[in-house]
Image (cartoon, rainbow, N blue to C red):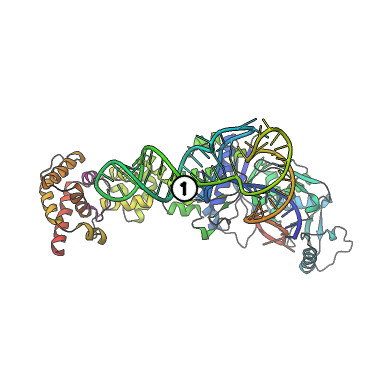
Amino acid sequence: MAVITRFPPSPTGYLHIGSARTALYSWLYARKHGGRFVLRIEDTDRQRSNEESVQAILDGMSWLGLDYDEGPFFQTQRMNRYQEVIDQLLDAGKAYHCYCTREELDEMRAQQRARGDKPRYDGRCRQRSQPPQDVPPVVRFKNPLDGNVVIDDLVKGRIIISNSELDDLIIARSDGTPTYNFTVVVDDMDMRITHVIRGDDHVNNTPRQINILKALGVEPPRYAHVPMILGEDGKRLSKRHGAVSVMQYRDDGYLPRALVNYLVRLGWSHGDQEIFTRQEMIELFNIGNVQRGSAVFNPEKLLWLNYEYIKAAKVEELRDHARWHFENAGINIDEQPNWKQVLRVNQQRSKTLLELVGRSMFFFRELDGYDAKSVKKHFKGQAGEILVELRAQLERLDPWDAEHIHLCLHRLAERLSIGLGKIAQPLRIAVAGVAVSPPIDETLAILGKKKVLHRVDAAVDYIDTMM
RNA sequence: GCUCCCUUCGUCUAGUGGUUAGGACGCCGGCCUCUCACGUCGGUAACAGGGGUUCGAGUCCCCUAGGGAGCGCCA
């Protein structure tokens, strides 16, 4: 039987990092088994669902490279089907109308709680003979009274829940709309889902869903409940822990492959391996190896992974991902003649695309001043004279490449009996505006003779007026 | 309160009865060095606690503690 997995987000916001991991696991499972991956939008809560959120989820999936084979299906477009199944259950006597008012239910729950019991519906409307005329009924599923539900969970192992712990849940509201646990069941059934991979906050829903499935006469799918992702404080990952929106990571300069790699390793592992190509993930991923306990999201490790991916990226690929960030900084990367060299020299030292852009700016744009701290530290003493002397040497230099620039600087240092730092640092500030740049010889080589001489002149002037 | 789930370094994890409990991130230190970053070498640090079973337990069983989830006419 072909594997079919699904990802069923509710469009009530951005794509959450935790949902993304669940989606990734489902996607991997389908890909690994040559199966199909279904996207289903659970938008039955019309109050909170909206079109922008649907788009945000689609964007997030696409950015992560999680493609789907079927869908997106929208639950709001399947209302007739849900109604059909509700009627079917009603006709078969497997569901019934309940006329209990909210007040009645509240009181019942209060009593149960007071007794120390778990609050649950006691089934009083199962036998109701004379329905009141003025109360629009809900439809409840007739849950089995005894016996157990057994889940052989692919992650957690065998879970056994007694039916006496369950109650007759509402499958249709008084306005006729179906509820979550019911729509999921009908969808999973109709879409022939074979493996439900979802967060373990759903384990409590699973026995109910299995019971409905059985009442409908279908074989339940296999379940895999993956643990939640927690924040540093051990609480469920949420906004207060930092970025939880997948797209925020794009904005912050992360590579999608790095995020995916981080996510797959959070709660799953293959021996000591840390870095996986997409192909390796598909081949090696094994749902049974997923950790049973929840994992804490660790931004530092993600940052490290991002750096590893930036470092290893082909320069063209890097440019494609960074293009947008350069645009935001006012640079059209495609118009820069030396973009390749600049990216190459900076990709070894940037943990994010944002940092890469920051480190690259002075190559592409004229300086708009000097960093105050750097000036104070290095534009002093003989710096001005040294720059003047250096300028003369550089002007004569030919060919203009890193190797010859290197030699030139060393010769000057030797001749003046000073450390290379005494030359390199003022020079660095002159061309980069700060005391931070790639190796000075490479920096000059990439920048080009003309710009370098021009910037050195400007720096000499600046130092003169300073004195 | 009730039910279910979980528990190896700070964090992610390896480990399926016999290991000096391994790796990764982070952190600390040495080296390298024109800055930043890298690299490199080394270090720090864990089986939640208590009972069993066993010649032997991180690994199996029980209890306790701690954490999480659920108990809606939300999804």
User: Residue A33 location, x and y as percent?
Assistant: 60, 34
Q: Nearer the viewer, residue A402 or A373?
A: A373
For the N terminus of chain A, the quadrant is: top right
Q: Which residues are magenta?
A: A431-446
Q: Residues within 10 Å of mark 1 (few under 14, many from 20)?
A: few
Q: Is residue A120 left or right of residue A79?
A: right
Where does the image place residue A198, in percent across and percent down from the top left? Answer: 63, 47
Q: Which residue is mark 1?
A: A301
Please indicate, yes or no, whether residue A7 appears anywhere in the rendered image. Answer: no
Judge left or right: residue A423 versus residue A114. left
Front residue of this view, candidates A276 and A51: A276
Residue A40: in magenta span: no
Q: Give the residue type at disc 1.
A: Lys
**What residue sits 50% from the left and 52% below the top?**
A246
Q: Nearer the viewer, residue A161 or A124?
A: A161
Q: Dot 1 lies on which element?
A: helix
Q: Quadrant of residue A175?
A: bottom right
Taking A192 as reference, is A382 above or below it? below
In the image: residue A99, left or right of residue B29: right
Q: Quadrant of residue A117?
A: bottom right
Q: Residue at x 48, y 47 (%)?
A: A63
Measured as percent of width and height from the top left, residue A333 is found at 31, 49
Asked whether A438 falls inside the magenta stretch, the response is yes
Identified at 82% across, 46% down, the residue is A147
Is residue A211 at least partly visible in the picture? yes
Q: x, y (%) of residue B65?
A: 67, 55
